[in-house]
Image (cartoon, coloured by chain):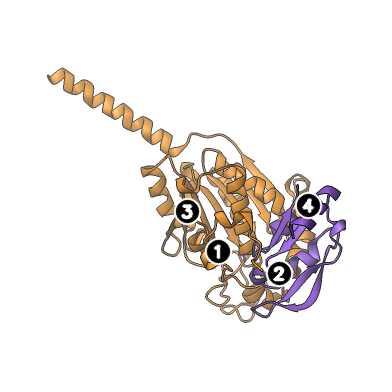
């Protein structure tokens, strides 16, 4: 994991992490991301909510709108 | 694999997360913005007292925000907060409560706290209904909405709380929605760092108990509607009442400097102490 993080940092990309068991599947991040980075997946979490997945992380410009809109503290953007 | 940890988990009670708000509820977004604001201005949460009343949005500070909290009776958070502020002016006192608490049952406390201009930050989460108890009509419910207690339709117009607080004499008043999170965050920082009574009305969503009555079943529908209906206060100034009827006026409604209540109270106390001392010296 750390190796990939370092590589992303070198490329100037952002790291999007989703805390799976905090997510309640409200899909606000999917709808309101200005660059449509997220997509609904078939994957369920422990509580039975469909999780969002990051489709194209290179698109992300690190505006942090999803991090701030998320009611569950489930999205973490590492924006170095 | 261990799960990633959010940096703001230092400010919330991590052991009880995820919180109990419904999926898509705006209270979570308000909690997120509030913790961001506290982190942003570097407030020490040990030097804060958060006061809340009864209702879903009163759960934002108590139990989720990690500071001293007062979870008070219905409608009285501002009254309790006034007491805290007068006795401990060194603490930052924040009231986060719902529209039922602040505008409905506790409406009188609100206008008098604004009139006194006591140094409180009041964040009113306005979800336009009594959500926790099952969707009864609130003073902030728009006319025409069917609720549990108005099964045919609501005939009362909605209360414009922020405008009332401006008229009552508060020093900082703003209105934002849960869609406009960045300005909301900035506004919260302004409210907490300045002296005097500051009030932010946060239009929030309740997909469960309000949304299903007006055909907005998810948080996304609400946020989309907030995005469409919101209009900045400087644009709204030239518009007529009819044009603004279905719109949400957002932005900073008032920002003035006025004498603060606790400071004035301390001045009076100091004057009286001096007078008594002088009298005592005369007798001696």
Mark 4 — residue? A6
* Image mark count: 4
* Chain letter tied to orange: B
* Both labels 2 and 3 in a single chain: yes
Residue under the point 40% across and 54% down:
B80
* Chain letter tied to purple: A
User: The residue tagged with tag 3: helix, strand or loop?
Assistant: loop
Residue B161 in the image: above or below residue B1: above
Q: Are marks 1 and 4 in contact (CB under 8 Å)?
A: no
In this rendering, which labeled residue sits more in front, label 4 or label 3? 4
* Both labels 2 and 4 in a single chain: no
User: The residue tagged with tag 2: helix, strand or loop?
Assistant: helix
Q: Are marks 4 and 3 in contact (CB under 8 Å)?
A: no
Mark 2 — residue? B219
Residue B23 in the image: above or below residue B283: below
Which chain is disc 2 placed on?
B
Residue under the point 66% across and 72% down:
B23
Mark 3 — residue? B67
Q: Toward the viewer: B278 or B217? A: B217
Specify the quadrant of the image occupied by residue A32: bottom right
- Label 1, label 4: how far apart the Cα atoms are: 40 Å
Mark 1 — residue? B57
Q: Residue B8: where, in percent of width, then height?
A: 60, 55
Q: Residues within 10 Å of mark 2 (few under 14, many from 20)?
A: many
User: The residue tagged with tag 1: helix, strand or loop?
Assistant: helix
User: The residue tagged with tag 4: helix, strand or loop?
Assistant: helix
- Label 1, label 2: how far apart the Cα atoms are: 15 Å
Which chain is disc 3 placed on?
B
Q: Which mark is residue B212?
A: none
């Amino acid at each position: 994991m750390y190796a990939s993080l370092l590589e992303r940092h070198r490329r100037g990309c952002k790291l999007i992490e989703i805390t799976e068991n905090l997510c309640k599947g409200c899909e606000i991040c999917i709808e309101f991301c200005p660059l449509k980075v997220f997509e609904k997946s078939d994957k369920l979490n422990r509580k039975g909510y469909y999780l969002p997945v990051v489709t194209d992380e290179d698109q992300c410009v690190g505006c942090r709108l999803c991090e701030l809109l998320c009611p569950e503290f489930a999205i973490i953007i590492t924006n170095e | 694999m261990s799960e990633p940890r959010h940096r703001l988990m230092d400010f919330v009670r991590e052991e009880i997360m995820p919180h109990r708000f419904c999926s898509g509820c705006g209270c979570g977004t308000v909690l997120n913005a509030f913790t961001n604001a506290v982190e942003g201005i570097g407030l020490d949460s040990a030097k804060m007292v958060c006061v809340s009343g009864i209702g879903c949005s009163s759960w934002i500070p108590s139990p989720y925000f990690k500071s001293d909290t007062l979870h008070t009776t219905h409608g009285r958070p501002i009254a309790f907060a006034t007491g805290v502020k007068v006795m401990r002016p060194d603490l930052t006192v924040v009231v986060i409560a719902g529209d039922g608490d602040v505008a409905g049952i506790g409406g009188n406390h609100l206008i008098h706290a604004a009139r006194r201009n006591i140094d409180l930050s009041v964040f009113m989460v306005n979800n336009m209904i009594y959500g926790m108890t099952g969707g009864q009509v609130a003073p902030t419910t728009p006319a025409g909405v069917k609720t549990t207690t108005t099964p045919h339709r609501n005939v009362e117009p909605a209360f414009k709380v922020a405008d009332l607080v401006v008229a009552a004499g508060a020093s900082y008043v703003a209105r934002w929605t849960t869609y406009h999170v960045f300005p909301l965050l900035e506004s919260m920082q302004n409210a907490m760092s300045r002296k005097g009574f500051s009030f932010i009305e946060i239009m929030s969503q309740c997909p469960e108990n309000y949304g299903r009555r007006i055909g907005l079943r998810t948080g996304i529908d609400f946020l989309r509607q907030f995005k469409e209906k919101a209009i900045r206060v400087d644009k709204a100034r030239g518009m007529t009442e009819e044009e603004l009827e279905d719109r949400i006026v957002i932005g900073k409604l008032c920002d003035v400097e006025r004498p603060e209540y606790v400071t004035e109270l301390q001045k009076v106390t100091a004057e009286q102490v001096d007078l008594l001392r002088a009298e005592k010296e005369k007798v001696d």
